[in-house]
Amino acid sequence: MTTPHSHRSGPPIRVLVADDQKVVREGLAMMLGLLPGIEVTGTAIDGADAVRQVASSDPDIVLMDLNMPTLDGVEATRQLVERGCRTRVVVLTTYADDDWVFRALQAGARGFLSKDSGAQEIRHAIITVASGEAQLDPSVQRRLLEVLAGGGHVGVAAAAPPAPPADGLTARETEVLVEIAQGLSNQEIAGRLFVSEATVKTHINHLLAKTACRDRAALVAYAYRTGRAG
């Protein structure tokens, strides 16, 4: 089946790979280098090295491990965001510890993938995040929803401010928010609501503006906090 990202024109997306394990780092770099539309700018041995290389080579994406020495992936992500870097972070993690995932989300990571992900899944996430959207591995999103639904107090759920009493969402925007909270893609939401994907994107942009959420993952948390998770 052809997806919106199956064929991509334009310059390649420049990716920096950051992982403290040499075999993983070099393996990822080799694999990414074989994928169409992807150019590997280099590899970083830890978060501090990643921050330095972003400053010098300005990649589009950092494929970031979380648990690294010297400077972990969460703090490296935070530093990149605080410095106003245009580079976006896609986390590639085992996510054994929920707190790692939620802290990375708060720090500004835009994508989360399992290290079990295949080459095409990683390519899709890189292209999606490079285009300005967020991409969560289904297992990560499911765990996030479980914690939020259970009233968990880690990461995003703990730090999120209380929802405003009236956020001005329209009925249609609320419908879209509910579908996002259920993990549906833009294409799936469009099919379910009988509208175009462009219309769904417009509604999502309105949602982000009205809720002050940064990305799709934050909208999921917002939906649960405000009782709009379906």
Image: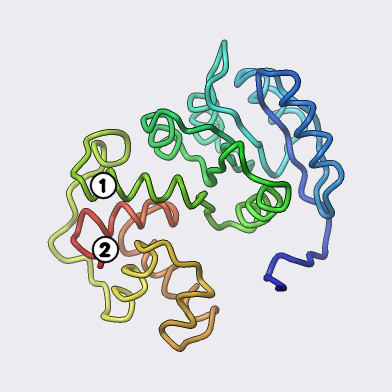
In this view, 158 is above or below 50 = below
Name the residue type under label 2: Ala
User: Horizontal placement of 1 versus 137: left or right?
Assistant: right
The answer to whether residue 36 is left or right of residue 149 is right
- Residue at image x 26%, y 72%? 169
**Residue furthest to the top:** 70
- Residue 75 is left or right of residue 171, and the answer is right
Mark 1 neighbour class, 10 Å CA radius: few under 14, some 14 to 19, many 20 or more:
many
Furthest residue in direction front, as rendered: 116
Along the horizontal axis of the image, is 209 left or right of 53?
left
Q: What residue type is disc 1 on?
A: Leu
Instruction: Tell which circle, 2 or 1, labels the residue nearer the N-terminal end.
Output: 1
The residue identified by callout 2 is 229
Q: Is residue 156 above or below residue 69?
A: below
Q: Residue at x 35, y 61 (%)?
A: 181
Q: Are marks 2 and 1 in contact (CB under 8 Å)?
A: yes
* Label 2 packing within 10 angstroms: few (<14), some (14-19), many (20+): many
Residue 148 is marked as 1
Furthest residue in direction bottom, as rendered = 194
Where on the picture, by quarter, is residue 52?
top right
Coordinates of residue 147 in the picture (x, y in percent): 28, 43
Which part of the image, by quadrant, shows the N terminus?
A: bottom right
Label 1 secondary element = helix
